[in-house]
């Protein structure tokens, strides 16, 4: 069975993507930062899913996830980089977001996807 990994999969678009892929015969691995929400989402999908806590903004968390993925599934066929965070208020102006907040957003929303791609490619 092909394995699909979805980041930010405990709610919203990530969860619906996981549902759709499971419905098409993929084994889906839901990832995110909230263990309770991930468990609930995986139970909602059923037998074609499992979950793993993952913070894509943290190198160690990503490394541990891929160690688990290799030992559990041995492969990845699809990676959906859906995880993202909003820093500051929605519609915040440049003057309202400090450099630290911008750095955190770039680390999570751009570099996080890079972290996942870098380790997924050798397993594809």
Image (cartoon, rainbow, N blue to C red):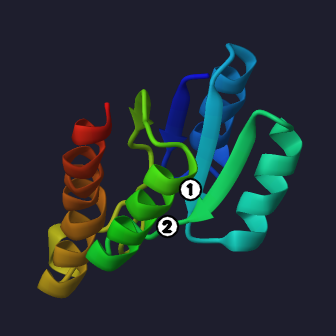
Q: Are the residues flagged by discs 1 and 2 in contact, CB closer than 8 Å?
A: yes
Viewer-closest of 60 and 92: 60
Report the side of 48 relative to 77 (left or right).
right
Question: What residue lies at 79% left-to-right and 61% top-to-bottom?
Answer: 39
Q: Position of residue 112 (x, y in %)?
A: 28, 59
Q: What number is the disc on residue 124?
A: none
Question: What residue lies at 43% left-to-right and 70% top-to-bottom?
Answer: 55
Viewer-closest of 47 and 41: 47
Viewer-closest of 96 and 79: 79
Q: Label 2: how many residues lie within 10 Å, few (<14), some (14-19) or many (20+)?
A: many
Q: What number is the disc on residue 31?
A: 1
Q: In which quarter of the image is residue 63?
A: bottom left
Sooner in the amino-acid sequence: mark 1 or mark 2: 1
Q: Position of residue 50 (x, y in %)?
A: 70, 49
Q: What number is the disc on residue 54?
A: 2
Q: Position of residue 103 (x, y in %)?
A: 16, 76
Please indicate, yes or no, whether residue 86 appears anywhere in the rendered image: yes
Query: Which of the image's four quarters has the N terminus?
Result: top right
């Amino acid at each position: 069975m092909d394995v699909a990994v979805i980041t930010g999969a405990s709610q919203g678009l990530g969860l619906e993507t996981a549902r759709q892929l499971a419905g098409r015969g993929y084994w889906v691995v839901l990832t995110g930062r909230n263990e309770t929400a991930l468990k609930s989402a995986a139970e909602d999908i059923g037998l074609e899913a499992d979950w793993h806590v993952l913070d894509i903004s943290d190198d160690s968390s990503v490394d541990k996830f891929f160690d688990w993925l290799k030992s559990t599934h041995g492969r990845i066929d699809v990676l959906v980089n859906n995880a993202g965070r909003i820093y500051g208020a929605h519609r915040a102006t440049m003057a309202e977001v400090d450099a630290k907040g911008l750095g955190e957003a770039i680390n999570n929303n751009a570099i996080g996807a890079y972290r996942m791609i870098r380790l997924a490619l050798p397993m594809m």
